[in-house]
Image (cartoon, rainbow, N blue to C red):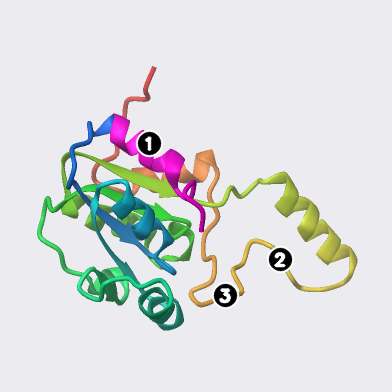
Amino acid sequence: MGPEYFADQIITAKQLLPFTEGMSALDIGAGLGKGMISLEKAGFDTYGFEPSEPFYARAIDKMGLDRSKLRYGMIEEMEYDEERFDFITFGAVLEHLYHPAESIELALRWLKPNGVVHIEVPYSNHLISRITNLVYKLKGTSFVTNTSPMHSPFHLYEFGLKSFEELGKKTSIYCREKPA
């Protein structure tokens, strides 16, 4: 993991907040903890949770994350105080969740007023994925590149601009006006 890991997202979050040392962050689906480490190094008081036991164990044992800051469990099992975090990230996580709209709403309860939520998902119409899927199909396999073979739940959803807008409509915070 280099110092550039998650750097662009952190810079953007700091510009939007505006940042002061010790602001709180939550990494939803923390994986091995790389995002948490980058956020800590950038001055955030960082917490996270991870539903995959092997990833959670590696984050603690190999990456050295503090057990008091990284929880093990699914988003539906997590409890945090309302308006607890300044910055919340779903980094390549939302496509794995059984109920993405409800998960976003839950995270928004944990977000402080004027806080920032970062959501990063694989693009459903990515050219390389489409080419790879075509190659798999031509070879006669049932493989597809857009499912995650690492752990369940696999990619349950794909997102493009239209599907992400539709997801937004399922949340109670959906803004009917489009930005100029």
Q: Which residue is mark 2?
A: 144
Residue extending furthest toward the right: 139
- Please identify, in this view, whether the residue under mark 3 or under mark 2 is nearer the observer: 3
Callout in the foreground (3, 1): 1
Q: CA separation, marks 1 and 2? A: 34 Å
The magenta-colored residue range is 1-15
Determine whether 84 is above or below 33 in the image. above
Write down the residue under mark 3.
150
Residue type highlighted by circle 1: Ile
For the view shown, which residue lies furthest in the top direction? 180
Residue 10 lies in the magenta stretch: yes
Residue 165 in view in this figure: no
Amino acid, disc 2: Val
Res. 138 image quadrant: bottom right
Using residue 83 as the reference point, say whether residue 28 is left or right of it. right
Give the mark nearest the N terminus, 3 or 2. 2
User: Disc 3 and disc 1: Cα gap in Å?
Assistant: 29 Å
Disc 1 target residue: 11
Residue 7 horizontal side relative to residue 86, left or right? right
- Give the mark, 1 or 2, whose residue is nearer the N terminus: 1
Describe residue 141's horizontal placement relative to residue 7 as left or right.
Answer: right
Per the image, label 2 sits on a secondary structure element best described as loop
Q: Secondary structure at mark 1?
A: helix
Residue 83 position within the rendered picture, expressed as x and y whole percent measured from the top left? 12, 50
Q: Is residue 88 magenta?
A: no
Expressed as whole percent of the image width and height from the top left, the position of residue 6 reads 45, 48
- Foreground: disc 1 or disc 2: 1
- Crowd class of label 2 (few under 14; some 14 to 19; many from 20; radius 10 Å): some
Query: Please, what is the dominant secondary structure of the magenta stretch?
Result: helix
Residue at image point 45% right, 39% down: 8
